[in-house]
Amino acid sequence: MSAAQNHQADVVIAGGGIAGIVAALELLDSGQQILILDRDEKSRFGGLARDSFGAMFFVDTAIQRCSGFRDSPELALKDWHSYAQFSDTDYWPKQWAEYYVNSCTTEGYHWLKQQGVRFLPIPNWVERGTDRHPGNSVPRFHIVWGSGKGLIEPLIARLYSHKNAAKLKVLFRHQVTDIETQNGVVTGLRGVDESSGREFVAQAENTIIASGGICGSIERIKENWFADWGEPPQLILNGSHRYAEGRLHDAAQKTGANVTHLDRNWLYPAGIRHPQPRHPNHGLSIIPCKSALWLDAQGRRFGPEPLVGGFDAREIVETICRQEHKYSWQVLNKRIAVRELSISGSEHNPALRDKKALKFIRGFLFGAEGLVEKMLSESEDFIVATSLDELADKMKIHSEEGAVFDTRAMKQAVRDYDKSVTNRNMPQDRQSELIDKLREYWPDRIRSCKLQAIDDARAYPLIAIREHILSRKSLGGIQTDLQSRVLSKQGEVLPNLYAVGEAAGYGGGGIHGHRSLEGTFLGGCVLSARLAGADILDRKVN
């Protein structure tokens, strides 16, 4: 066997996603030798953030104020705790949540703008929560102009054009498999150069784990399934990075790190199979159409509270997972789909991704005709019909093995809902009340239908979308303090070892608790990476 390749650096970073890139940017100013090891191809530099929708949670920004909303860290922290359902033992997650709401705008929003990242002038309002778990009380979801591409490419450009760029080395196709230690102290990383098959050792004074979470491994998701939800679904689609397998979580544990809350994962309820999959069970996340009827695997309407997107994604996932067959349907028509359908990520938002302003505004005002046609022609999970009877029959045919589809219940659910929408003398359906609540915010009013019946011949064809649970982000991870230093189970700092971004549960091993207010994933990557870089520099000076 060939001798192992040897690399030397002041700081070695495992992972070339946004957290690894930001950490490198923080450190380059010092003139230190920085080595990034990334398993993916160079064209995929930036990780899952490159493919993301590119939106971030910030507090009390000029964008919010110009939109008429007054926000504060105190209000944001109240919303965060309400949504997170922290336990009494979640000391570091609570510390990180408080740090986030107080620092995300100065250390995230303004810093990113200095790097050349731009944001749309209107905040989105997501994860509003329910009466049981109130969420965002004001809109805080700031969308990057250019989507994930518009977030990552300015940061990569800053890396490569930095005055100390000669001090930076990025090695792709390098899979990190283990953490090197000597006399109990971390000294670097070990792995395999997949382009040559040779092993490598990267020695450094400081090591940063920025390798993502566990959601790229469906096996690990199932192994760490949240116990209160019973058995995991047979099919979970993969919407995460294909290399987010948790290998370095295991390596960190071997060094004595405390890895926590791996059963807390941010799953999405409306996943469909990717028409051109790039890895097994590759899935896309539909942003649930609010005016569609959400039905269980047997065609029955969820209740007594109907499922409506925009309020509490985790509660919807939990409701679906309580069923015998853990997938669902949304039933709608083309008019609803054109007005309301969207898919998370940069791939299916080309006008935003490519910064085509007129095309983006036209889509916002008039809907996503092109996206709907693409899904109708390419997706096996989109079922089309020209009558309610035909749609019910096709849904029965496309039901998963073991699920007994009730065509009668499905048709009755549609007819009952349509009567409540079209007959003013009938009591308003609860779903219509929730849609009206969302429509009070003018961007949501433009992007949602008002009182639209499903079985309306003027809005044909009818559409049913078969939706599965989709993995996305890990809410647990390697526990860290507020300098992103890795902690042992006894709460002691492990010298020279840091964890950032999703690998650290976005900070503290679980900054979100059980729920995310959304946008805090990318924001957590930026903040935790900057803190790691700052601590390494501070130690270097002192």
Image (spheres, grey):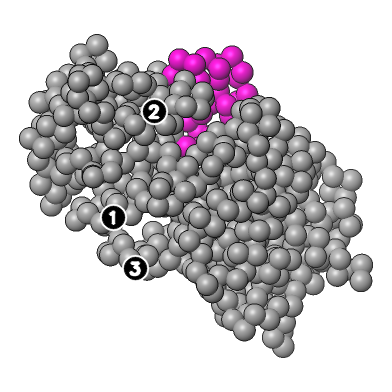
| Residue 323, image quadrant | bottom left
Q: In the image, 389: left or right of 94?
A: left
Is 322 colored magenta in this rendering? Answer: no
**Residue position for label 1:** 321
Q: What amino acid does circle 3 point to?
A: Ala
Instruction: Please report the residue visible at 85 percent of the width from the left and 63 percent of the height from the top.
Output: 537
C-alpha separation, residue under disc 2 versus residue under disc 1 = 27 Å
Query: Residue 380's x, y, as percent?
Result: 27, 35
Which quadrant is the N terminus positioned in?
bottom right
Closer to the N terminus: mark 1 or mark 3? Answer: 3
In the image, farthest residue toward the right: 541
Instruction: Please report the residue visible at 81 percent of the width from the left and 60 percent of the height from the top.
Output: 534
Q: Nearer the viewer, mark 2 or mark 3?
A: 2
Instruction: Count residues near mark 2 (Cα–Cα under 10 Å), then give few for <14, some for 14-19, many for 20+.
Output: some
| Residue 437, image quadrant | top left
Q: What amino acid does circle 2 point to?
A: Asp
**Residue position for label 2:** 436
Q: Nearer the viewer, residue 425 or 187?
A: 425
Which quadrant is the C terminus positioned in?
bottom right
C-alpha separation, residue under disc 1 versus residue under disc 3 = 11 Å
Secondary structure under badge 3? helix
**Residue position for label 3:** 227
Query: Residue 61's x, y, as percent?
Result: 70, 37
* Marks 2 and 3 close (CB-CB < 8 Å): no
The boundaries of the magenta stretch are 344-367
Instruction: Count residues near mark 1 (Cα–Cα under 10 Å), then give few for <14, some for 14-19, many for 20+.
Output: many
Is 359 colored magenta in this rendering? Answer: yes
* Marks 1 and 3 close (CB-CB < 8 Å): no
